[in-house]
Amino acid sequence: MTFNKKVLICSMLSSIFMVAAAQAQMYKSVGPDGKVTYSDQPPAANQKVEKKKLPDTLEGGNLPPELAIVVAKNPVTLYSANGCSPCNDGRGLLKSLGIPFTEKTVNTAADQEKMKQVSGDLQLPLLVIANVKFRGYSMDDWKDALSKAGYPATSKLPKDYRYAAAEPAAPPPPPAVPKVQEAARQAATPQPQPKKPDDGFKF
């Protein structure tokens, strides 16, 4: 291969990567009429722009632009519990369809209280698409709802995509600092020294 061909190939690859990087950007725009739209294309100059942040558990998932837009607009959350067979079926359906989702487990009293705030009851599994809730598992209803939310009928996830581990619906609070440790920390902190009073003139 000649030097010129190598340069040409390198420049072509560079252009492809630049185009891919540009397409990976996702924009939420607000038009003059207040209408909100999502797109991988930069909006017009007269529109307000903000980048839409994905849920924490989906960040860095390298999602295709068209799928990332749907996830940002209509995020999916699954509430499940240990030993819940319908929950396992629901999780399996979401993964078989290639639906990026956040899973929250309901295994403690605090988790149950949190779920009551979200759903009003404790029926599991609970599927939440944006602000729409589906109590109990129904394959047909879930598929229909996901399709209406804009998710593709077949998986578009990259081969290296990994689902994040499930998290408790009510994460435990951070451990409190013991009083003994706090007292030791304060004792180790240098205290400001009071200024000495002037005892005469200085020359």
Image: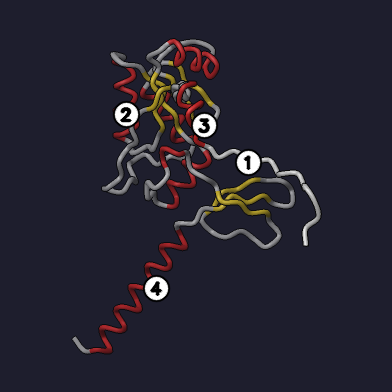
How many residues crowd mark 1 within 10 Å: few (<14), some (14–19), many (20+)? few
Give whichever of discs 3 and 2 has the lower sequence position.
Answer: 2
Q: Nearer the viewer, mark 2 or mark 4?
A: 4
Q: Describe the element under mark 2 as helix, strand or loop.
A: helix
Q: Which amino acid is tagged 1?
A: Pro
Asked where in the image residue 7 lies, by quadrant, the reply is bottom left
Give whichever of discs 4 and 1 has the lower sequence position.
Answer: 4
Q: Which amino acid is tagged 3?
A: Ala
Proximity of marks 3 and 4: CB atoms separated by less than 8 Å? no
Q: Identify the residue at the far left of this view.
A: 1
Q: Is residue 50 visible?
A: yes
**Residue 173 locus on image (x, y percent):** 47, 23
Give whichever of discs 3 and 4 has the lower sequence position.
Answer: 4
**Residue 194 locus on image (x, y percent):** 68, 40
**Residue 157 locus on image (x, y percent):** 33, 45
Q: Which residue carries the number 3 mark?
A: 187
Q: Which amino acid is tagged 4?
A: Ser
Q: Which residue carries the number 2 mark?
A: 93
The quarter of the rendered structure image containing the C terminus is bottom right
Q: Nearer the viewer, mark 3 or mark 2?
A: 3
Residue 14 vs 173, above or below: the answer is below
Q: Describe the element under mark 3 as helix, strand or loop.
A: helix
Q: Describe the element under mark 4 as helix, strand or loop.
A: helix
Q: Which residue carries the number 1 mark?
A: 192
Give whichever of discs 2 and 4 has the lower sequence position.
Answer: 4
Q: Which residue carries the number 4 mark?
A: 15
The residue located at (46%, 22%) in the rendering is: 180
The quarter of the rendered structure image containing the N terminus is bottom left
Left or right, 139 with reference to 112: left
